Structure formats: structure tokens, C-alpha cells
Amino acid sequence: MKYRLLLLIGWLSFTQLNAQDTFSIVAVDTVTGEVGSAGASCIDNSAIAGGAKIISDIIPGRGAIHTQSYWLATNQVNAHNRMVAGDSPQQIIDWLVANDAQNLPGRRQYGIVDMDPFGSPRSAAYTGATSMDWKGHITGRNYAIQGNILLNEGIIDSMEVRFLRTEGTLSDKLMAALQGANVPGADSRCLSEGVSSLSAFIRMAKITNHPDTLFLDLNVPQAPYGVEPIDSLQVLYDNWKMITTLPDNQKERAEKWEIFPNPAGDFLYIKVADNADQFAELLISDQNGSELKRIKRSNFSNAIDVSTFRSGTYIITMINSDGGQTYKKFIKN
């Protein structure tokens, strides 16, 4: 805890500094039109609300922008406006360097990716000479990876390899890229705590999404001391994926039980259809994947006491006697 206190004191010594971020990736999928953003930092919710997520700006159907290293809101807003106006990633970076809000472009780091008017991907990145070592970036046809205050250049190299070699959706590839940086001290400030970072996020937009309601928006703003936030984010992602991509047999099973009210007050009620598969137990976990309550069939009651749960989103899993599982989310007021 002493380390985090010193980190916060150092943070506050920068009068106009809002974030000094580390490793991140932005990418697009030109087939689906999806836009993605993921990253992590040794800055967490105790220093700035939301932790590393502050660097992420997604414009659905167009692209994503990461403004990091001595983050400034003005620079981020300007970058957003330039993308909306039609500038390419390289044009946006050129403009930001020439028009830095503090006239200190050498401090900054940017990663930008978009789809041009014909649907082709474009990417660009920038690492200022006076941002903190180790620093650097890599760009590909549809992605940009960048980091500063890193353990070494192998961090972003590993992220790129994981991104390119992982099969699956764009979100699968982004999550894999973060796992490529899941080593102690990836953000070198976190080495003494034995973790890569203190906060981590992954965000995805479909073409039809509103910027404030993305179809995937997971964030670990602050992990307990010594707990790896990328692993916590992986749990959230795995749960999200199971819920949103249920196989047909699980969808059928999920229709045979319901929870109410949602949002819940002190009690959550469960109604199971007469023709539902026999279930063995219920499991309730939080967004970090931590198990909060497990109820065996023999102790099952339609009313579950959740009065001690904090306000937030939870996952309830019905585990059937044949080992099959179905999932639902509920919100606790």
C-alpha cells in the first residue's frame, strides 16, 4: 500500500497531468465493421476515475483513438474531432503534434486506427522523444500497439504476436494481446507489486452502437494489492462471452428459468419452468469472477437474499445435473 500512496503523491505533483499510461492496442475488423480498444496501466481508480480506460475513445463504424503519456483531455477531444471531420490516423497525429495543448508534443504517445470511406483499414502511432522509457509503438494494417514506462520492448512485441496468432473475433484477439503483456512489471512501475499493471480494460463497438452504449465495455479500474488486473479482466471477458454467445442448447435451457426483479432489491427471485432440466446448484459471482454464493439444489429457495451485495452487476449461473451451465446477469440496486 505504501507503493500506491507514493504513486498517488507523484501523480498529484503534475498540475495538468491526468494520466501517464502504458501499454495499449486499438484495432478494427473491416469484415464486421467492429472497432476495438484495450489497454492497462499502473495508474488505477485511486489516481483517476476509471483507471486506464480514460485513454480510450471509440467512434463506432469509424475508428479508435488512444491518447496516452501525460494525457490531456484537450488533446483527446481534438483527436476525436479530427477523426469525426474525416482526417486519417496519420493526419490526426500530425495535427496533434503541431497543435499540442501545452506545446509539449514530445511527451505524448498516440495510437489511432480507422476505416477509410471505402472500408479499408488505416493505422498510425506516435511516440514522443521525451515520454518515459521504455517507450515505442508498432503498427499493422488494422492495428496500432503502443506503450511507455515499459519493462522493455518485448512487451509490445509479445502483444503483437498474440494479436496476430489468435484465432477468433476481434475481441478475442484484443484480449489475447493484453495477455501478451501479462508479466510482472510490464508497466515497470508495477514491478515491485509483482503485477503487470493496476487497471485494465477492453471495449468494442459495432457499427450500430452509440459511443456511450458499446456492446462490449469491460473495465477493472482497480485490483486488490498483488492481484493481476489482466487476469481479472479475462474472467469478466470469459463470462461476457459465455453469456452473449450461448450455443443453441444453452439458449433453450436459459429460456426455462428466469430471475426477477431485475434490478433486484434485497431479494432476487428465481422461477424455474416445470419442464426445465434438473439443476444441481446455483452460483452467484461478481463482475471480477469472485464467487459470492453457491446454493445446492437441496437448499434451493425461490428467494435468494442479496441484501448484503453492493450495488452493481452480478452473474448467476445455473449448473445442471448433466454438467451443463446457463448464465444470466442481474443488477443489484
Image (tube, helix red, strand yellow):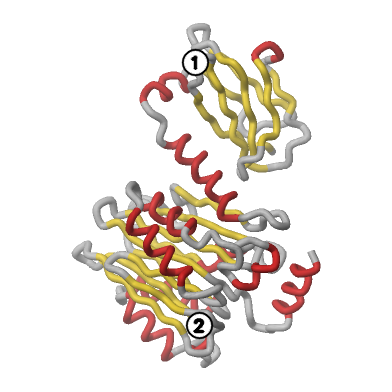
Amino acid type assigned to the residue bearing label 1 in the image: Asp
Amino acid type assigned to the residue bearing label 2 in the image: Arg
Work out whether residue 72 can be spotted.
Answer: no
Query: Looking at the rendering, in which quadrant would you find the N terminus?
Result: bottom right
* Residue 125 spot, x, y in % from top left: 38, 77
Mark 2 or 1 closer to N-term? 2
Work out whether residue 147 can be spotted.
Answer: yes
- The residue nearer to you, when weighing 249 against 165, is 165
Residue at 19 percent across and 64 percent down: it is 118
How many other residues sit within 10 Å of disc 2, few (<14), some (14-19) or many (≥20)?
many
How many other residues sit within 10 Å of disc 1, few (<14), some (14-19) or many (≥20)?
few
Residue at 78 percent across and 35 percent down: it is 308
Figure check: 314 above or below 206? above
Residue that carries the numbered disc 2 in the rendered image:
108
* Residue 58 spot, x, y in % from top left: 43, 62
- The residue nearer to you, when weighing 166 against 53, is 166
Residue at 34 percent across and 76 percent down: it is 124
- The residue nearer to you, when weighing 50 against 324, is 324
Residue at 48 percent across and 21 percent down: it is 324
Front of the two marks 2 and 1: 1
Residue that carries the numbered disc 1 in the rendered image:
322
Residue 93, located in which quarter of the rendered image? bottom left
